[in-house]
Amino acid sequence: MDQETAIRNQIEEGIALKRYLQGEVRLLIKIAEELAQAFRRGNRAFLFGNGGSAADAQHITAELAGKFRLEREALPAISLTTNSSSLTAIANDYGYDRVFVRQLEGLMVGGDVVIGISTSGNSRSVLLAMEEAKRRGAVTIAFTGKAGRLREMAEYALSLPSNDTARIQEAHITAGHIICYLVEEALFGAGRDE
C-alpha cells in the first residue's frame, strides 16, 4: 500500500469512529449530566489512564478545571496521572497496578465521578481503580475500545468499535470535548437552571 492510500485509510477510520459517536449522543449527554450533578453537589471528578490515555485524562481535566469555551469558575476535576512523586512512590511501595487505587483511597468520596480510560479495556491499574471507585460509591465512567473488561465494570461505558489505539484516542478526545461543552452549558450557559 502506498503512503497516500495508507494516510487516507487512517483518516477514514477516524471519521468512521466519529460517526459512531453520533449514535452515542444520549450516552454523552448522560455522562455530562452526571458530571454536572456531581459538581452541583460539591463532588469532584477523577480521571486516569496510562500512556496516551493518561494524556487524554489530563486533557479533559484541564478543560474542566480551567475552561473549555466559557469564562467561568473552575470545576473540581483532578487527573491522577500528573503527580510524578505520588505515582513513583506508590508504584515503588505497592506496585504499579495500585497507582490509581491508592490515590482514590485518599481522595475520593461517595458521589464523586471517576473516569477510567483504557483503549484496550484491560489495563490492570485502571481496572483496580474502577473496582475501588464502585466500592466507594462513585459514579463510574469508562472510555475504551471494543474489547476488555473495563466497559463491563462501569456504570456508563463509551466503548468504541475498534482495536486501533490511535483512532480510539482521537475519538475519546472528541467525546471528551463534547462532554466538557455540555457540562459548561449545563452549569454556566445562558439556558442553565438558576
Image (tube, rainbow, N blue to C red):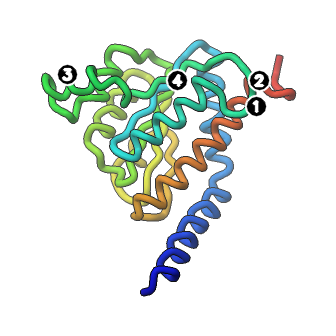
Say which amino acid is labelled 4: Ala
Q: Which residue is mark 3?
A: 89
Cα–Cα gap, marks 4 and 1: 17 Å
Assess whether mark 1 and mark 2 are in contact (beta carbons under 8 angstroms).
Answer: yes
Q: Earlier in the sequence, mark 2 or mark 3?
A: 3
Q: CA distance from mark 2 to mark 4?
A: 16 Å
Q: Which residue is mark 1?
A: 185
Work out whether mark 3 precedes mark 1 in sequence or the reverse, and give the earlier one: 3
Which residue is located at x 50 percent, y 71 percent? 10
Residue 32 drawn above or below residue 4: above
Q: Residues within 10 Å of mark 4 (few under 14, many from 20)?
A: many
Q: Position of residue 148 (x, y in %)?
A: 34, 54
Q: Is residue 118 left or right of residue 66?
A: left
Q: Name the residue that disc number 4 marks.
A: 77
**Against 168, is 115 above or below?**
above
Please, what is the three-letter code of the amino acid marked with disc 2?
A: Phe
* Mark 3 nearby-residue class (10 Å; few <14, some 14–19, many ≥20): few
Q: Locate the C terminus by quadrant.
A: top right
